[in-house]
Amino acid sequence: MMFATILVGTDGSETATVAVSHAIELAGELRARLLVVSAYEPVSNVRLRRERIDTPHDLEWMVNPREDVLAVLDEAAESARSGGVGEVETFARQGDAADAILDVAEERGCDLIVVGNKGMTGAKRFLLGSVPNKVSHHAPCSVLIVRTT
């Protein structure tokens, strides 16, 4: 079985970073393309209103946790490049983490999805084990569940 395109999901937590490291190692050895996916939640209107008071109108859309997700993705991409992965793409998707992983895997025709076994518990939105559970049941390709603890 040839894995030409490998996808890994991360939320920047310690356990997710272990899964990312495995995916980078694998992609490097197999000379595969690596896709890194992270999901973010829409921000509550109350918080947005509070933060927008000092924000110029054209920058309002930037006041949300997406910046954190983009930082997590940039860091993972940087690690991949320095780990010898030739082709790296990142995807920030709003909504459920498992859905984000599955959607990108389908859209990009991935051969392998890598997720951590602890379900990326770094953020409240990731219930323990829910992400690998959902991904493994609905994936359009093989899934590698990395033991992260």
Image (cartoon, helix red, strand yellow):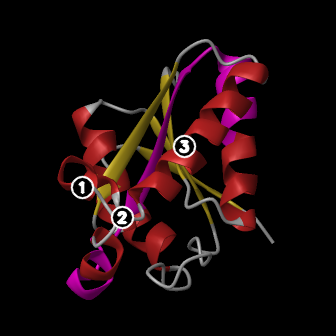
Q: Nearer the viewer, mark 3 or mark 2?
A: 2
Q: Residues within 10 Å of mark 1 (few under 14, many from 20)?
A: few
Residue 42 placement (x, y as % from top left) = 27, 71
Q: Quadrant of the C terminus?
A: bottom right
Q: Which mark is residue 73?
A: 3
For marks 2 and 1, give the CA distance. Answer: 7 Å
- Label 2 sits on a secondary structure element that is loop
For marks 1 and 3, give the CA distance. Answer: 19 Å
Q: Which mark is residue 61?
A: 1
Q: Which mark is residue 124?
A: none
Question: In this orientation, does residue 23 appear?
Answer: yes
Contact, CB < 8 Å: mark 3 with mark 2?
Answer: no
Which amino acid lies under the numbered mark 1 shown in the image of this protein?
A: Trp
Q: Which residue is mark 2?
A: 64
Which amino acid lies under the numbered mark 3 shown in the image of this protein?
A: Leu
Query: Which residue sits at x=32%, y=53%?
Result: 62
Between 131 and 145, which is closer to the camera in this rendering? 131
Residue 104 placement (x, y as % from top left) = 30, 42
For marks 3 and 2, give the CA distance. Answer: 16 Å
Contact, CB < 8 Å: mark 2 with mark 1?
Answer: yes
Residue 9 placement (x, y as % from top left) = 51, 52
Query: Which residue sits at x=60%, y=78%?
Result: 121
Q: Which residues are magenta?
A: 23-48
Query: Which residue sits at x=67%, y=66%?
Result: 13
- Label 3 sits on a secondary structure element that is helix
Placement of 5 over or under 63, stated as above or below: above
Placement of 34 over or under 29, stated as above or below: below
